[in-house]
Amino acid sequence: MPSKPRNRVGEIYGKLTVIGLSDRRSKAGNVYWWCICECGKKREVSSDCLSNKKRKKKTITTCKKCSKEI
Ligand SMILES: [Zn+2]
Protein backbone atom coordinates (compact mmCIF):
# COMPACT_ATOMS: atom_id res chain seq x y z
CA MET A 1 0.00 0.00 0.00
CA PRO A 2 1.46 3.36 -0.94
CA SER A 3 1.50 5.87 1.84
CA LYS A 4 -1.28 8.41 1.86
CA PRO A 5 -0.14 11.69 0.32
CA ARG A 6 -0.08 14.84 2.35
CA ASN A 7 -3.22 16.87 1.80
CA ARG A 8 -2.27 19.86 -0.31
CA VAL A 9 -5.75 21.11 -1.14
CA GLY A 10 -5.89 24.89 -0.88
CA GLU A 11 -2.16 25.36 -1.38
CA ILE A 12 -1.20 27.93 -4.01
CA TYR A 13 1.67 27.59 -6.46
CA GLY A 14 1.97 30.60 -8.73
CA LYS A 15 -1.36 30.85 -10.55
CA LEU A 16 -2.44 27.37 -9.52
CA THR A 17 -4.53 26.49 -6.52
CA VAL A 18 -4.71 22.82 -5.53
CA ILE A 19 -8.35 21.69 -5.54
CA GLY A 20 -8.19 17.93 -5.15
CA LEU A 21 -6.31 14.67 -5.39
CA SER A 22 -6.26 12.90 -8.74
CA ASP A 23 -6.42 9.14 -9.16
CA ARG A 24 -3.42 9.32 -11.45
CA ARG A 25 0.01 8.17 -10.28
CA SER A 26 3.34 8.61 -12.01
CA LYS A 27 5.64 5.67 -12.67
CA ALA A 28 7.74 6.83 -9.74
CA GLY A 29 4.69 6.62 -7.52
CA ASN A 30 4.09 10.33 -7.21
CA VAL A 31 0.49 11.38 -6.90
CA TYR A 32 -1.16 13.94 -9.14
CA TRP A 33 -3.19 16.85 -7.91
CA TRP A 34 -5.97 18.68 -9.70
CA CYS A 35 -5.18 22.37 -9.75
CA ILE A 36 -7.16 25.29 -11.01
CA CYS A 37 -5.43 28.18 -12.72
CA GLU A 38 -6.28 31.84 -12.24
CA CYS A 39 -7.82 31.74 -15.72
CA GLY A 40 -10.20 28.98 -14.62
CA LYS A 41 -8.62 26.05 -16.45
CA LYS A 42 -7.87 22.84 -14.60
CA ARG A 43 -4.58 21.04 -14.82
CA GLU A 44 -3.38 17.73 -13.40
CA VAL A 45 0.04 18.26 -11.85
CA SER A 46 2.45 15.72 -10.39
CA SER A 47 3.18 16.32 -6.72
CA ASP A 48 6.89 16.75 -7.40
CA CYS A 49 6.12 19.62 -9.81
CA LEU A 50 4.19 21.53 -7.17
CA SER A 51 6.80 23.60 -5.44
CA ASN A 52 7.45 27.19 -4.56
CA LYS A 53 11.16 26.71 -5.09
CA LYS A 54 11.74 28.74 -8.22
CA ARG A 55 15.07 27.11 -8.89
CA LYS A 56 13.35 23.84 -9.64
CA LYS A 57 13.08 23.78 -13.41
CA LYS A 58 10.15 21.43 -13.72
CA THR A 59 7.98 23.34 -11.28
CA ILE A 60 4.52 23.99 -12.71
CA THR A 61 2.77 27.19 -11.66
CA THR A 62 0.24 27.76 -14.46
CA CYS A 63 -2.09 25.79 -16.73
CA LYS A 64 -0.78 24.73 -20.15
CA LYS A 65 -2.46 27.65 -21.86
CA CYS A 66 -0.98 30.28 -19.56
CA SER A 67 2.48 28.72 -19.63
CA LYS A 68 2.56 29.43 -23.37
CA GLU A 69 1.69 33.07 -22.84
CA ILE A 70 4.61 33.75 -20.51
ZN1 LIG B 1 -4.32 29.48 -16.94
Image (cartoon, rainbow, N blue to C red):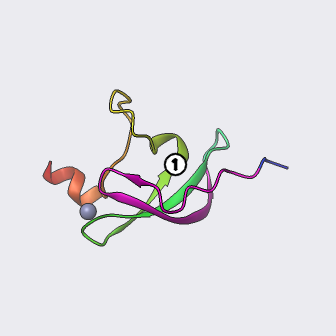
Q: Position of residue 17 (x, y in %)?
A: 40, 61
* Residue 15 sits above or below residue 49 on the image: below
Q: Give x and y (percent) for residue 40.
A: 30, 72
SS at badge 1: strand
Q: Mark 1 Cα within 10 Å, few/some/many (few <14, many 20+)?
A: some
Q: Percent position (x, y) of residue 34? A: 49, 63
**In x, y percent, where is residue 9?**
54, 62
The residue furthest left is 69
State the residue in front, 8 or 23: 8
Number of labelled discs?
1
Residue 5 is one of the magenta-drawn residues? yes
- Seen at 64% across and 38% down, the residue is 28
Left or right? Give the position of 64 relative to 20: left
Q: For residue 56, which quarter of the picture?
A: top left
Is residue 19 found left or right of 26 in the rendered image? left
Q: Is residue 58 left or right of residue 70?
A: right
Residue type indicated by callout 1: Ser
Q: Is residue 48 above or below residue 66?
A: above
- Residue farthest top in this picture: 55
Query: 8 or 33, which is in the foreground?
Result: 8
Label 1 near ligand 1 (CB < 8 Å): no
User: Is residue 42 in the magenta section?
Assistant: no
Which residue bears the numbered disc 1? Answer: 46
Q: Which residues are magenta?
A: 4-25
Looking at the image, which residue is at 34% across and 27% down? 55
Q: Is residue 3 above or below residue 17?
A: above
Q: Nearer the viewer, residue 63 or 17?
A: 17
Where in the image, quadrant-wise, is ligand 1 located? bottom left
